[in-house]
Amino acid sequence: GSAIGIGLGYLLNVPLAGWVPLAAAGLLLVYSFFAQYRMFLGNLLVALLVLIAVILPAGFFLFPGTPQDQTLLGELLTFAALAGWSTWTREWVKDLQDREGDLSAGSGSAAIRLSLAANKAGIYSTILFQVALVVSAVFFWSWIEKAMVLWAALILVFYAVLAFQVRHAESPESFSLPSKTAKIIMALGIAWMGILALNRCP
């Protein structure tokens, strides 16, 4: 995969973008051997990799020389930020779900080092940031098409559901449901990108 990325980068005359897959593979190695046992660092790397995956096509195929391309790049960056933050939230919830196993494996994640109340407060903060990002994106990028607005509203409803589930979760097993809800939010975000793409089609 890294070799294909490098080759494609030189073929399209964007060599810097071509080396990103290799760098991502290196980050995965760092995660496997070191970061997953450090508080916040492992989740940060996973979120960063997801963000890179969303924005990487722009490095190969989008050349922001026109206002339209600049808008597309900005919209893609918005989705990339949302993908990264939603991944962080999901990983945090999953750590709370897998707390006992991670503890026996010697992990030093926030789910182990911080109190349950502190973990919940941290998750709430990531949810609030994403809610603000969704709302501001609709207005800033003028996503006023009916389908875009309705889908944004649906995402916000699931954020409210996630916050409610996290609030009432106490044991590791009880975080299974919010973990699934976080996955649904990520899927809704991907679908939201598809809706925008369809609206951009002539």
Image (cartoon, rainbow, N blue to C red):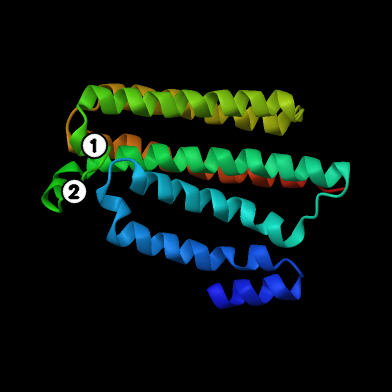
Q: Is residue 186 above or below residue 106?
A: above
Say which residue appears at 45% left-offset and 46% top-offset.
Answer: 47
User: Could you tell me residue 86's position as x and y percent?
Assistant: 47, 38
Q: Secondary structure at mark 2?
A: helix
Say which residue appears at 52% left-offset and 29% top-offset.
Answer: 130
Q: Is residue 88 left or right of residue 71?
A: left
Q: Could you say which quadrant of the image residue 92 lies in?
A: top left
Q: Which residue is mark 1?
A: 111
Q: Earlier in the sequence, mark 2 or mark 1?
A: 2
Q: Could you say which quadrant of the image residue 135 lies in?
A: top right
User: Could you tell me residue 25's position as x and y percent?
Assistant: 46, 66
Q: Are marks 2 and 1 in contact (CB under 8 Å)?
A: yes
Q: Residues within 10 Å of mark 1 (few under 14, many from 20)?
A: many
User: Could you tell me residue 176's position as x and y percent?
Assistant: 27, 39
Q: Could you say which quadrant of the image residue 68 lies in?
A: top right
Distance from the alpha carbon under mark 2 to that under mark 1: 9 Å
Q: Secondary structure at mark 1?
A: helix
From this viewpoint, is residue 185 visible?
no
Q: Residues within 10 Å of mark 2 (few under 14, many from 20)?
A: some
Q: Nearer the viewer, residue 61 or 15?
A: 15
Q: Nearer the viewer, residue 60 or 181?
A: 60
Q: Residue furthest left?
A: 104
Q: Is residue 22 left or right of residue 42?
A: right
Which numbered marker is on residue 102?
A: 2
Q: Amino acid at mark 1?
A: Ala
Q: Is residue 119 left or right of residue 30?
A: left
Say which residue appears at 61% left-offset and 71% top-offset.
Answer: 5
Q: Nearer the viewer, residue 188 or 80?
A: 80
Which numbered marker is on residue 131?
A: none
From this viewpoint, is residue 56 visible?
yes
User: Could you tell me residue 185's position as x and y percent?
Assistant: 48, 38
Q: Amino acid at mark 2?
A: Asp
